[in-house]
Every structure is written in C-alpha cells, then in structure tokens.
Image (spheres, helix red, strand yellow):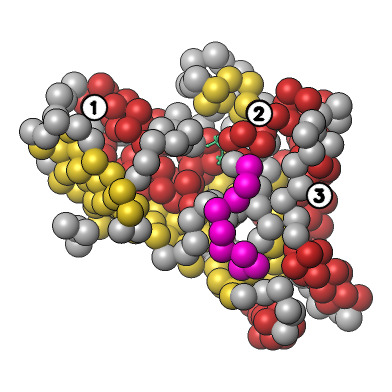
Amino acid sequence: MKATATANANIALVKYWGKRSSDPILPQNGSISMTCDGMTTKTTVEFSERPEHTVMINDEEFKKDEKDIHGHIDRVCKLAGIKQHARIISESNFPVAAGLASSASGFSALTVAACSAAGLKLSPKELSILTRQGSGSACRSIFGGFVEWHRGNREDGSDSYAEEIAAKEHWPDFRMIATIVEAKKKPVSSRGGMAQTVATCPYYKDWLATVDEDLKAVRDGIKARDFEKVGSTAEFNALKMHATMITTKPSIIYWIPATMEIIHAVRQMREDGLQAYFTMDAGPNVKVLCQEKDISEITDRLKDLDGVTNTILCKPGAGAKIVNDHLF
Ligand code: DP6
C-alpha cells in the first residue's frame, strides 16, 4: 500500500479567480494553463496501521493550514473504503508558496500517489475531479501540455474537470521563464485572496464577463500555435485579475518594486522587437512567456535586473504519473 507520483506545476494563461462553491471547490470561471516541466513535486504515500496521517513537505512537518492535506487523504480513504492512515513525504524542486503554483503540483502528485497506494483505479478525468477538491488549480496538473479546466454547471462538480487541449509535443518551442524575486511565503493566500475578491470587489462581475472570450482566444491560439494571440491574451487576462485583487477591501497588492521592474522590462523587450509577454499569479513573481528562439536574449535581460534573484526555465511538461523510486 505504497506508491510514489510526480507532478508538475502549471501556470494559468487564463486564470481561475473566484469560487462559486468552497465545498466542493467549484470555480466561478473556466481556466487554461500550461503544465511546466521545470517545476516538479514528488510525493510518496504509504498506508499502514498508524494513529494518524503524518505529512512531511520539503523536510518539514506540515502544520494544518487552509489547504487541508489531511482532509484530502481522508477523501481518498473514504473512496477506497480503507481505515489505515497515511505517511506522506513530499519534495518540490522550486520555492513553495511564493505564487509559483506549488499547491498545484503538490495536490496532484498527492492524489495520484494516494489513489494508487489505496488500490483505487480512477480515470484521468476522475483523478482531476478528486484533485480539484483539494486545490482547484491542481486539477489541471493531472494533464500535460496545455490544459483547460471546465467551469461546469452542476452543484456536485461532476462536470467541472480538466482535460488536455494540446499535448506537450504540439508546441515544443513554447517557453515560460519564471522569475524569482522573493522566495518568501506570501502575505495573502490565493484561497483567501479570491474569496475576498468575490465578496468585495465591485468589478468582479466585469472580470467574469470577459473570461469566456479570453478562453476562446487562448484555446484557438494554442491550437494554431499563434504566439502573439496566446501571449497578449494571457498578459491582459493576468492584468484584469490583478485589477480585481487591487480593488478589494482591504486591497490586495502582490506586486513589489521588482515585479514592476520586470513588467517594464518585458514591455521594453517588445519595443525592441522581441516576442515576450508576462503573467502573474497570487504573488510577486512574474512569469515571462516566450519562444525557444528568444530564450538566451530574454534570459540575459531578466538576469540583469536588480530585483531578479533567479530564473526557472519551463517547457510544456508531462502530466502527473506514477514512478518507481520512493522517497522512503
Ligand atoms: C492565481 O488553486 O491555489 O494561481 O482552489 O483555493 O486551492 P484553491 O486556490 P488555488 O488558486 C490558484 C489561483 C491562481 C490562478 C490559477 O492558477 O488559475
């Protein structure tokens, strides 16, 4: 009753921002992401006779927080009809909780490993529905390449799942450079931030009114490998999401001076004829979208910026999968 899985983080090109239900987690809007091969979590789960679940993440014991890992494991136990408890060890190769989607790779690797250790055989769609109940954006990391999470309409969430739009091989020269400006834990979680936005932002309905056209543009752009269309729509979508964050009460501003430095640098790159766009999540780090041909010039320019401490280069990556080398 032991299994290990790896999963990659994903970065949204059209963002999930806001829930219509928190139990089960169901989104207000659909979203599209790229699964990123450079940002990986590996998780081993073993069920045995023990008094409770124990969870170690990057060598530290996990303290219960709003992302309820214990509750998620209970969900898997209930589905599998088992009474044992889990020992869980998880390691990520990138900074956690810094707006770099660590919960996406974390919850998808956990779900895949736990289901396998519990003897549950679920389809990828069922795995995505189960993963979504731990953390919304994580349901997209079950799949590789470019992935759409459908909003769905049903209250039980049976039509709110992720699926692959295009395999990673479809667009092998698409790149995302994650810039690390501050690898600290973020002040407001994405979960708290989106709840506050839905509750208090006067423009939230305007955000929702524009998401479907962004989904269509990015979906069509990915299918046609139209970089300008995907990049420009993703950048505008991220700015619209941040506009809703900034106009909540109290205001949530994830940007720090280094964030602005990178935004302006990317705009300058475009003035200079480079094809580059940016996106940002619930944190100060900026992800730069570009193509293989421009990687060295864009990376050099980013590394020259005072606020950038590191960069992580990502290609379209694989979905979550079972591997044989356990962490214990
Ligand atoms: C800004 O998936 O972390 O990264 O469902 O509450 O766990 P919960 O939220 P989470 O939110 C991610 C928000 C985002 C946008 C995105 O990834 O689509």
Asked if marks 3 and 2 touch (Cβ < 8 Å), the reply is: no
Asked if marks 1 and 3 touch (Cβ < 8 Å), the reply is: no
Q: Which quadrant of the rendered structure holds the C terminus?
A: bottom left
Q: Position of residue 27 (x, y in %)?
A: 61, 28
The residue sitting at the top extreme is 155
Mark 3: give few (<14), some (14-19) or many (20+) Cα within 10 Å.
Answer: some
Q: Earlier in the sequence, mark 1 or mark 3?
A: 1
Q: Earlier in the sequence, mark 3 or mark 2?
A: 2
**The one of 259 and 164 positioned closer to us in this rendering:** 259
Q: Position of residue 165 (x, y in %)?
A: 57, 47
Amino acid carrying label 3: it is Leu
Residue visible at 78% across and 25% down in the picture:
200
Mark 1: give few (<14), some (14-19) or many (20+) Cα within 10 Å.
Answer: many
Q: With 233 as the anchor, is 12 left or right in this view?
A: left
Residue visible at 23% across and 36% down in the picture:
53
Q: Is mark 3 within 8 Å of ligand 1?
A: no
Mark 2: give few (<14), some (14-19) or many (20+) Cα within 10 Å.
Answer: some
Residue that numbered label 3 is attached to: 239
Q: Which quadrant of the rendered structure holds the N terminus?
A: top left
Ligand 1 falls in quadrant: top right
Whole-number angstrom distance, CA of label 2 to CA of label 1: 29 Å
**Magenta-colored span:** 180-188
Residue 312, above or below 133: below
Q: Is mark 2 within 8 Å of ligand 1?
A: no
Q: Position of residue 81 (x, y in %)?
A: 18, 21
Residue that numbered label 2 is attached to: 195
Residue that numbered label 1 is attached to: 77
Give yes or no for residue 122 being in the magenta stretch: no
**The one of 61 and 308 positioned closer to us in this rendering:** 61
Q: Earlier in the sequence, mark 2 or mark 1?
A: 1
Amino acid carrying label 1: it is Cys
